Amino acid sequence: QVQLLESGGGLVQPGGSLRLSCAASGNIISIIAMGWYRQAPGKQRELVANIPDFGDANYADSVKGRFTISEGDAKRSVWLQMNNLRPEDAAIYCCNAEIQTHSLPARGYWGQGTQVTVSS
C-alpha cells in the first residue's frame, strides 16, 4: 500500500509564498516521477511541476520563475516552493507519484490534496 502525505497549504496574500511538501511511504521499489497537480473550481486539473527519476524538472509555463520543485535525498519526498503567488494560483494542489511497489507494476498514486488560497 502506498500513501502520499501532503502538507503546507493555506491562505496567503498575493505576492506571498507557501511551501508544499509530499512524502511517499509504503512498499515502494522505485518512484519514476513525483510532482504536483492543481485544480481550480471550474477548471481542468493541470500539471504544476514534477521531477522524473531521470531528467530535469518540468513546470507549467504559468509558474516558471516563481515555483521551484525539489526532492529529498531518498527521492521519497518532494517540496514545492511557491513564491510571488497570484490569485490565479488558488486551487487544490495534489501530490502525484508514479510508483512501482513489490506487488504492483508502476502506476500513479494521488495524495488527498491541500488547499491553496491567494487572497487579500
Image (tube, grey):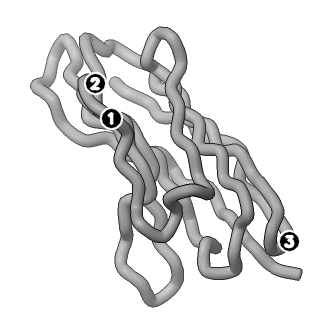
Amino acid under disc 2? Asp
Residue 104 percent coordinates (x, y): 14, 23
* Sequence-wise first label, 3 or 1: 3
Instruction: Give the alpha-carbon distance from disc 2 to disc 1, as whole Å.
Output: 9 Å
Tell me: residue 60, above or below residue 95: below
Residue 64 located left or right of residue 17: left
What kind of element bears circle 2?
A: loop
* Residue farthest toward the left in the current orientation of the protein: 105
Tell me, for residue 53, which label it has, or none.
Answer: 2
Quarter location, residue 5: top right
* Residue farthest toward the front in the current orientation of the protein: 65
What residue would you read off at disc 3?
Answer: 13
Quarter location, residue 22: top right
Mark 2–mark 1 contact, CB under 8 Å? Answer: no
Residue under the point 16% across and 16% down: 103
Residue 18 percent coordinates (x, y): 75, 52
Residue under the point 37% across and 27% down: 2
Mark 2–mark 3 contact, CB under 8 Å? Answer: no
What residue would you read off at disc 1?
Answer: 56
What kind of element bears circle 1?
A: loop
Residue 106 percent coordinates (x, y): 15, 29
Residue under the point 40% across and 17% down: 26
Residue 2 located left or right of residue 24: left
